Image: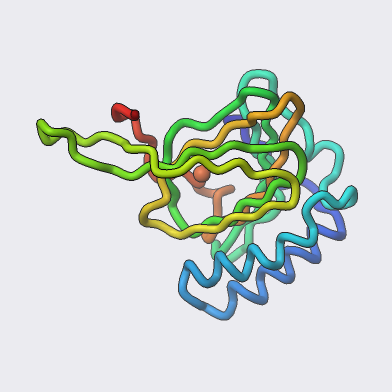
Amino acid sequence: MTTTLPARTTARMAALVREIRSVVDRGLAPDLTAYLVGELLSPHLGRGDLLAPAQQEGDPERYRQHVLHAEPDGSFSVVALVWLPGQETCIHDHVSWCVAGVHEGQESERRYRLAASAGGAARLVPTEDVVNGPGEVCGFAPPGDIHRVRNSCTDKAISIHVYGADVSRLGTSIRRVYRLPAE
Ligand SMILES: [Fe+2]
């Protein structure tokens, strides 16, 4: 993944950040926070004035992360992930609650759970395949948040992610990369 650090955000993104702050500052449980932030994110997706042109640029080598906002107290951050056709993540989980909404294109997600094989070694078992199109939002909170995401369409895909942590400081929202056998 390539990361671009905070750039000037649009007025719409600034408004969304204020809305997210109003929820995060309530100090609710992580899963409820993710749900409410997802409700706020949804109406902004697909709007032409949400992202500046530079925030929609991909990288031919790997999916690209544009950091749009990092709250000074570290309580949340907002990024745009830009995926060119076929680009994908590793199998991973997350450092915090997360909300993801598709702004443009289509993303396919495979979710996994950890299981033990007959010999006792850990392995990954797929639990669900989800295809998310424009305007669709999903939110989750660890644990049980192991997945892999890929751009499954023939054009660029862009999704907006909100995390309950400062990914500009951490560099990534990924807590652990799983290199276990997967079915
Ligand atoms: Fe993820």
Question: Residue 77, how many percent across, how many down?
Answer: 61, 56
User: From the image, which quarter does the C terminus lie in?
Assistant: top left
Question: Residue 65, how many percent across, how many down?
Answer: 64, 38
Looking at the image, residue 146 lies above or below residue 177: below
Splitting the image into 4 quarters, where does residue 15 fall?
A: bottom right
Viewed as shown, does residue 10 lie left or right of 63?
A: right
Q: Residue pushed farthest left? A: 119
Task: Say which residue appears at 68% left-offset and 52% top-offset.
Answer: 136
Q: Is residue 172 visible?
A: no
Q: How is the image coloured?
A: rainbow
Q: Is residue 166 visible?
A: yes
Question: Residue 75, how many percent across, how many down?
Answer: 55, 65
In front of the other: 53 or 99: 99
User: From the image, which quarter does the N terminus lie in?
Assistant: top right
Q: Residue pushed farthest bottom? A: 26
Question: Residue 64, how many percent across, how many down?
Answer: 65, 33
Q: Residue pushed farthest top? A: 61
In front of the other: 133 or 158: 133
Splitting the image into 4 quarters, where does residue 36 fall?
A: bottom right
Task: Say which residue appears at 86% left-offset and 38% top-offset.
Answer: 53
Viewed as shown, does residue 128 lie left or right of 150?
A: left
Task: Say which residue appears at 58% left-offset and 61% top-offset.
Answer: 76
Task: Say which residue appears at 55% left-offset and 58% top-offset.
Answer: 139
Splitting the image into 4 quarters, where does residue 83 fall?
A: top right
Image label count: 0
